[in-house]
Structure formats: structure tokens, C-alpha cells
Amino acid sequence: MDIKLTCQLEKDDFTKFSLYNARKKFLYLPVLAALIIVCMFVLVYLLSEKTYEMRILGALAVFGGIGVDLLLYLLICRRAQKYIESNALLLKPGELIINSGGFQSNNETGSGKIAFNTIYRVVETRNEFYIYLTTISALILLKKHFNSPEEILCFKQLLTQCMLNEKLKLMK
């Protein structure tokens, strides 16, 4: 059975993917470092005299940790926005046909095919499917582009039939 989707991404969809991807790859280390710094200053603050300088250092550590995380978030969003601006084709509407052979994409610039055995990984979130072609690039399928919930179930069944389970991270 073929599943036909008419897809069109918006800037927010791509930004959400970039944040999802960055969260699992890049944000753990800065968050961990910020937590360690905050804990270190809290411990020093609790174990030493409560002087004005210690209160200032503690406040700087807390705001510094939050600031680093906020800065990373803003940089990732800006990077996603620049990528979209330089690749206007990402926002063009297109048709996607999914069957046991894989994915067939057609849009105004051409067509392409992705076989299931070339897919690196598939991740399902609440509103999207991320079909990873490499560790960081993915085809984004929004669930709202499917015609019905039954079609989503059919797609998930097709994925489980055509791909290895360790490559799938699907919601129940």
C-alpha cells in the first residue's frame, strides 16, 4: 500500500528539529558544566563565611550557568534560521510517496528516492517523525501531513516490517 503525503515544512519545524538534534548531541556538556559550577559555589557559600563577595560570586555562577545555556539555545536557533534562508528549497511544497520500497520524493526541482536499508535511524516525537539519513541530517515528516491516524499506524507498521528494530525509536 502506498502512503501519499503532501508536505511543506515551515521555519518552526526545522528549528524544532535543530533543537531536538542539538539537545541530544551538544547541550548535555554545557548544562553539566553549569550545574557543577553552581553546585561548587553553593557548597563554598554554605561552608564559608557569608561575605558580600561570596554572595556576588554565587549569583554570578548561577546567572553564568543560565546565560551559557540561553546563549547556546539562541545560537542553535540562529544557525537553523540561516540554514533555512540559504536553502529555500526546504520550505517548498512537495509530494512524498511511502511504500515497501522506501520514500519517493517529488517537488518542483526534481525527485529522489530513499531506500529503507539506507536509513540510519527513525525517531518519532509527539508531532513528527525524524528519518535520519546520517547522524545529524534527517527527513522531517510532520504527523499533520498524514491524512488520518490509521495512515500513521500503517506507516509505523511499514517501518517495523522494513527496518531493524534497533534503528527505530517509535512511540507506543
Image (cartoon, grey):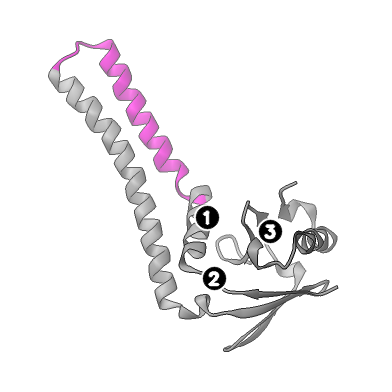
12 in magenta: no
27 in magenta: yes
Q: Which residue is mark 2?
A: 9
Q: Is residue 100 above or below residue 94?
A: above
Number of residues whose C-alpha sits closer than 10 Å to that of mark 2, classed few (under 14), some (14–19) or many (20 or more)? some
Q: Which amino acid does the dot numbered 3 rest on?
A: Val
Name the spot of residue 10 as percent of width and height, x first: 50, 69
Q: Is residue 15 left or right of residue 107?
A: left
Q: Which residue is mark 3?
A: 122
Q: Earlier in the sequence, mark 2 or mark 1?
A: 2
Q: Which amino acid does the dot numbered 2 rest on?
A: Leu
User: Do the residues bearing badges 1 and 3 touch, measured as CB atoms within 8 Å?
Assistant: no
Residue that appears at 63% across and 67% down? 133
Name the spot of residue 101 as percent of width and height, x first: 81, 75
Q: Earlier in the sequence, mark 3 or mark 2?
A: 2
Q: Is residue 9 left or right of residue 49?
A: right
The magenta region covers 25-51
State the separation of the CA atoms marked 3 and 2: 18 Å
Q: Is residue 171 left or right of residue 37?
A: right
